[in-house]
Every structure is written in C-alpha cells, then in structure tokens.
C-alpha cells in the first residue's frame, strides 16, 4: 500500500458517495435523468442518419446496408433501459483508474443517471471486440448482466485479429 494511505472499507466508500448525511433515497430524489429518456432523446444517432439529418459516420463496410437493423435495435434501448438503479452511464477504460494496490477507482461521474447495471457493463466490454475477445460470452456470464435483454441479432462486423 502507498505510504500515507489506508484501505477504505466498502461501507465507508458508500458513505463518501452519498455525501455527509445523504441516504440512498436522497440520491434517488436528486432528479437525475433516466437512461430511458436519454436513449430516446439523445442517443438516437442511427435514426438521425436514416432520416438524413446526420451524415453517415465513418463505419466498416457492410454497416450502411444494415442501417435499418441499427435503427430498429436503437429503438429498443429506451424500453430496455427502464430502471430505478443508478449507473455511471459512461463507463469505459479511461474512466477507470487502477491504484498501486490494484483497487479500481471509477471516475468522471458526469452522466450519473437511473438505468440498469448491465448498461455500464456493456459499455466497458465493447473495447474487447476489436481484440477478438468473446465479449458476448463474457457479458452473458457476468453477474452484472442479470436482467439484460437477449435480443437475437448478428452484428454486421467480425472482430479483427489483433488491432483493427
């Protein structure tokens, strides 16, 4: 352990996240946004591309031909995202710091909102596709994926061996 540091107990970390005197119920009462609403209002990029209001981003071959599939899948997220739980909503590698003791610290909580736990897990695992990892298998086996939708769909891309 680094000099001058002490290991935090989980109950103490929970107290720090709540702030002085805050209960979990008070966090819920802060009026935070809901992922379902964000998905409907702000995360509809494929719908906007299909409508012609946004240009097609740089994507691998085969994606433009599957635009209708992407719009359909994107439209399912608001219904899947209904949850009273609190999530980070932007969990990715650059928002996770590993300290010298090996403890993970989640940072950049700008997008805290109500949503299902599996959403953060899915965002964090996305980086595994280009590396050729069995991301779908890891997701399905993870306890955080409990309650995640099981939409049958074949992605229009194939993982690249090594670096894409």
Image (cartoon, grey):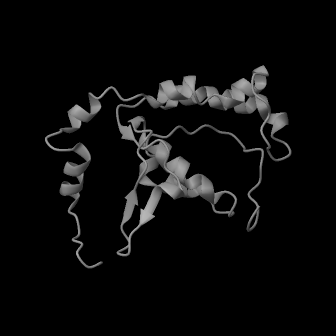
The answer to whether 105 is drawn above or below residue 58 in the figure is: below
User: Quick one: 9 or 67, which is closer to the camera?
Assistant: 9
The residue positioned 35% from the left and 31% from the top of the image is 84
Viewer-side residue, 162 vs 153: 162
Q: Is residue 107 left or right of residue 10?
A: right
Relative image position of residue 80 (x, y in whole percent): 51, 31
Q: Quadrant of the N terminus?
A: bottom left
Left or right of 114 on screen, residue 73: right
For the residue pair 131 and 110, the one nearer the viewer reads as: 110
Q: Pick out the residue farthest to the front.
A: 4
Residue 136 appears in the figure: no
- The C terminus appears in which quarter of the rendering? bottom right
62 relative position to 35: left or right: right
* Residue 46 percent location from the top left of the image: 71, 30
Residue 111, placed above or below residue 82: below
Can you name the residue that lies furthest to the left here?
21
Res 85 → quadrant: top left
Q: Position of residue 97 (x, y in %)?
A: 44, 63
């Amino acid at each position: 352990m680094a000099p001058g540091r002490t290991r935090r107990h989980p109950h103490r970390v929970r107290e720090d996240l709540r702030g002085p005197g805050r209960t979990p119920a008070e966090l819920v009462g802060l009026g935070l946004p809901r992922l379902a609403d964000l998905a409907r209002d702000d995360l509809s990029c494929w719908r906007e591309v299909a409508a012609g209001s946004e240009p097609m981003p740089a994507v691998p071959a085969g994606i433009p031909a599957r635009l209708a599939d992407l719009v359909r899948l994107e439209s399912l997220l608001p219904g899947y995202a209904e949850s009273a739980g609190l999530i980070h909503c932007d969990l990715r590698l650059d928002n996770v710091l590993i300290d010298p003791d090996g403890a993970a610290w989640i940072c950049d909580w700008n997008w805290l909102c109500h949503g299902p736990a599996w959403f953060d897990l899915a965002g964090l695992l996305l980086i595994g596709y280009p590396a050729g990892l069995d991301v779908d298998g890891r997701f399905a086996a993870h306890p955080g994926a409990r309650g995640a939708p099981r939409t049958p769909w074949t992605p229009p891309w194939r993982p690249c061996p090594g670096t894409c």
